[in-house]
Image (cartoon, rainbow, N blue to C red):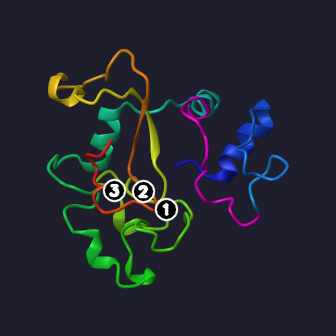
Amino acid sequence: PITNQQYQRFVFATQHPAPGHWLDGQPLAGTEQFPVTYVSWNDARAFGAWAGVRLPSEAEWEKAARWPNDERRFPWGDDDPNLYLISFPEARLLNYSNIVGETLPVGQHPEGASPYGVHNMAGNVMEWVADWYGPDYYATSPASDPSGPLSGEQRVARGGHFLATREVVNVTVR
């Protein structure tokens, strides 16, 4: 996820509108390393263009979340995150199920990283991907490098969020 600090540099450099909950175009003090929230798909795409990167396709996101074992349910494997809900210090894999009641800084749960070492692919905040949403796309998509539907009414977000249940932070939920 992009931090508030990274997004703030983009806002200052481009005069792009800041998220509505920021004060005077700036994130709240102390949240610089937290993930930016309340950005639209177009906002995320504009940030990527400014930063010289792009949103991943849905297939790329899923590969980063669970490759080489495409059967894993979570980025770290199949360990059920509910095993770690005893108390916040024990929630070492992700921020979900309203454990903390808000987002946490990016990279807070290194044990929950994907096989590629990508952090926060489950919980904390949902992440935009480039694709349009097609409810039955996986049933009809090519087996190799699917590019998503050509059009649609909604874009895809992946990864769950800090209020999400175990079922929503599963890497297959879209």
Residue at disc 3, secondary structure = loop
**Quadrant housing residue 167:** bottom left
Question: Is the residue marked by circle 3 packed among few (<14), some (14-19), or many (20+) residues within 10 Å?
Answer: many
Magenta range? 29-44
- Whether residue 38 is in magenta: the answer is yes
Question: Residue 80: horizontal and vertical position, in percent?
Answer: 23, 69
Q: Which mark is first along the chain, 1 or 3?
A: 1
Q: In the image, what residue occupies the spot 35% across and 40% down?
A: 61
Q: Amino acid at mark 2?
A: His
Which residue, given by chain and number where applicable, does mark 3 sit on? 169
Residue at disc 1, secondary structure = loop
Quote the CA–CA distance across marks 3 and 2. 13 Å
Query: CB atoms at circles 3 and 1 under 8 Å apart?
Result: no
Q: Is residue 145 above or below residue 98?
A: above
Using the image, tell me which numbered label, if any, was put on residue 119. Answer: 2
Which residue, given by chain and number where applicable, does mark 1 sit on? 107
Q: Is residue 44 above or below residue 164?
A: above
Q: In the image, what residue occupies the spot 85% across and 49% down?
A: 24
| Residue at the right extreme of this rendering | 24
Q: Is residue 26 above or below residue 89?
A: above
Q: Which mark is first along the chain, 1 or 2?
A: 1
**Quadrant housing residue 131:** top left
Question: Is the residue marked by circle 2 packed among few (<14), some (14-19), or many (20+) residues within 10 Å?
Answer: many
Quote the CA–CA distance across marks 3 and 1. 16 Å
Question: Residue 100: horizontal and vertical position, in percent?
Answer: 51, 73
Quote the CA–CA distance across marks 2 and 1. 6 Å
